[in-house]
Amino acid sequence: MKQVKYIFLTGGVVSSLGKGIAASSLGLLLKSRGLRVTIQKLDPYINVDPGTMSPYQHGEVYVTEDGAESDLDLGHYERFLDMNMTKSNNTTTGQVYYEVISRERRGDYLGATVQVVPHITDEIKRRMTLLADTKDYDVVITEIGGTVGDIESLPFLEAMRQFMLKVGRENSLSIHLTYVPYIEAAGEIKTKPTQHSVKTLLEIGIQPDILIIRSHAGVSQDIKEKIALFCNVQTKCVVSAKDVPTIYQVPLELESEGLDEIVVGKLHIRNGKPDLAKWRKLVRKINDPKNTVTVGVCGKYNMVPDAYKSILEAFVHAGAENDVKVNIKWISAQDLEKDKNTAKYLTGINGLLVPYGFGERGTEGKIKAIKFVRENKIPFFGICFGMQLAVVEFARNVLKMKDANSAEVRKTRNNVIDLMEEQKGITEKGGTMRLGSYACTVKRGTKTFDTYKAVNINERHRHRYEFNNRYRMQFEDAGMIFSGINPDKDLVEIIELPSHPWFIACQFHPELKSRATKAHPLFREFIKACKKKK
Ligand code: GLN
């Protein structure tokens, strides 16, 4: 297929409707029909990327292979499509303005007044084709962040309008995701917010071709007809997306509503039916687990589960492969820090995960939790900061270095975790951590090797601090194994304790590489160990 087809997805009425899941699900359906599909996200905020935002603001920062700090929806795209996203899959207002203003300073627009239309919209349109230009794709799905009606998203919608006009109706589609609320007092579901949202789009010159209607319990044929009439779309193009027990069921719901059939019809793509056998099996496993395990997650962003999105999804994948449902017990690092009774927080768990983190708050609580599970032989999995604090805990309580700490938390004589050499001169905060994919060599004869069954692996990073190699021998003499090492810089990437049933921690973020139908080996084996513990 020569002509690339473009699908735009906008959202209306309220945020958090699951645009990312809708885009990923459609992507999966098209991919299952044999098409080469990718998805990009356009984010209307002014930050160049979410890397400088707090997890409270934005949830997790998703890191791509090529080291972009990007929106967490890219994680859904990767998990559903089972393929890597790149820097080009996420654009922000910040990036667009940065580019245009740099050009203006260079003198590229000499003589002209630089304006939102056409200069900003031209730059957005240029970015809309970056992925198509690679010639790797038949279909590019573009998800526009925010909600229709927001001031910030206007330039993106205007660019979308211009773009669709240029490539033509047979090569582009506009899908609008909206919400139909149920009003208890009236005993009715209401379509008015959807009508208003579509009206707002029409004002900008965009007529949606398809409406995906989110609702709690689904919408009847009558309601579909009503929405179709008021919103000027065909009735068959009003697609219902009701709440389902797992996000992984959404593609199956949308397929049963005929979404992919409508899309390929409208875009004149001729090809076969989707092959969803593997996906159906996954959903069955998620919805019908044989058993459960409980994993404690001891972090400081617990009130914002989106901060740990990829970790939570990786548990779903690992659970499915182990025929268990993974229940999460949130353990507040700050509360644990203040409390003398550590056991109170950790009883009933079959394993503990200490996730990523930054800064001092809660670290002592995490260290207490790690000590407890190390001594009580409860499976432990540490990720990034979680590994660093496992190193600190071992130094303090096994090597008896009472003042051991990470230099990020406190400068002491024993900074067993210290700033990386290449980080020392860096003062700028944006995009300057050790980011993206790096090689790691796994030591044979370790649990880590049994897990990966490979010597050469690659994993994604996002950190500034690392294990201080000055202490390596002392740790090894006391029984810690450095089971993964970066071969180029000799950095510690994975640690394990062979005397413990399952105690593995890594400097990288394995959760970023877990896929729906291919759980990450570390998560899979950790859950297996939790199951055994239970
Ligand atoms: N704050 C630590 C560092 O910068 C760990 C980062 C993380 O957990 N992603 O090295």
Image (tube, rainbow, N blue to C red):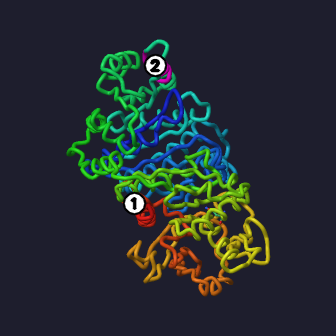
**Residue wearing tag 2:** 195
Q: Residue at x 70, y 72 (%)?
A: 419
Q: Write the start and end of the magenta stretch as one range.
A: 188-199
Task: Tell me the crowding category of disc 2: few under 14, some 14 to 19, or many 20 or more residues within 10 angstroms, Cα based.
Answer: many
- 219 above or below 469? above
> What kind of residue is marked 2?
Gln
Q: Is residue 2 visible?
A: no
Name of the residue lying farthest toward the left = 272
**Whole-percent x, y for residue 296 in the image:** 54, 56
Q: Residue at x 53, y 39 (%)?
A: 145
Camera-side mark, 2 or 1: 1
Task: Quarter of the image for the C terminus: give it.
Answer: bottom left
**Residue wearing tag 1:** 519
Instruction: Work out how far the residue at label 2 is from the one at label 1, CA to CA, in angstroms.
Output: 41 Å
Label 2 residue SS: helix
Q: Residue at x 49, y 63 (%)?
A: 510
**Whole-percent x, y for residue 402 in the image:** 75, 75
**Whole-percent x, y for residue 477 in the image:** 61, 87
